[in-house]
Image: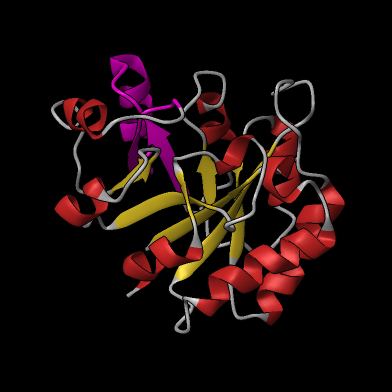
Amino acid sequence: MVIADFGSGETCHNDPEEVRRMIDGLAAVDPKRKAVIKWQLFMPETVPYCEPLFARTFFSALHYASDMGYRTTASVFDEWSLDYLLGFDIPFVKVAARDWCYPLIDKVPRGVKVIVSVFDEPSFLQMVYTQNCDIMVCVPKYPATAAEYEKRFLSIDLDDGISDHTPDLTLWRKYKPAVYERHFKLPDSTGKDSGDFASTPDVWKEILA
């Protein structure tokens, strides 16, 4: 599975036209609709240094993506975002690689698929493994290096996937993980989610080939 991370409100700026442009940009290089579109949901006070994605923006993005043949979900950072996300037909819940996010795992109803980004804190890993979640190795910094990821591969089972914050496709090309997540942007995107760790449609062509 390939996950296209569209970020919070930082890249789309909660502009419906920009949301549609982003989805159209992905669709142009993904004729078989291999990707799952994933946003980031949180209350303003949870992540005060980032522009939040408005509930109405997510709602309209999900429906436009569905019309385009895509399934949509989100990373959750607080109870509000989890409760809101669970009101939709989603392929999975993504729990972000933050220590305050991991308790949300226990609040996801049984039968709902959970994917968790993890780093190598043993206590967090134990929690995730005992909850039977799917795992993506993550280095929660932007950008990160391939070497920082590979150091974590020594302590984390790589059978599941990678949430890639590196500037290029080195990890994708080398490991071809079962689940791969990467930030998506357009060539003219702006905002904190559109740095070197995010890739344009031309780069996404290789991932979706």
| Residue 134 place in picture, x, y as percent | 36, 46
Residue at x-position 62% and y-position 34%: 192
Q: Is residue 38 left or right of residue 57?
A: left
| Residue 135 place in picture, x, y as percent | 34, 42
In the rendered structure, does residue 136 fall within the stretch colored magenta? yes
| Residue 183 place in picture, x, y as percent | 50, 48
In the rendered structure, does residue 93 fall within the stretch colored magenta? no
Q: Quadrant of residue 15?
A: bottom right
Q: Is residue 129 left or right of residue 90?
A: left
Quadrant of image for the N terminus: bottom left
Q: Quadrant of residue 17?
A: bottom right
Q: Please, is residue 122 above or below residue 8 in the view?
A: above
Figure colour scheme: secondary structure
Residue at x-position 18% and y-position 25%: 151
Q: Please, is residue 69 above or below residue 94 in the view?
A: below
Q: Residue furthest bottom?
A: 31
The residues colored magenta run: 114-141
Q: Is residue 101 left or right of residue 80?
A: left
Q: Please, is residue 47 above or below residue 88 in the view?
A: above
Q: Residue furthest front?
A: 188
| Residue 25 place in picture, x, y as percent | 59, 70
Q: Nearer the viewer, residue 80 or 170?
A: 170
Q: Residue furthest right?
A: 56
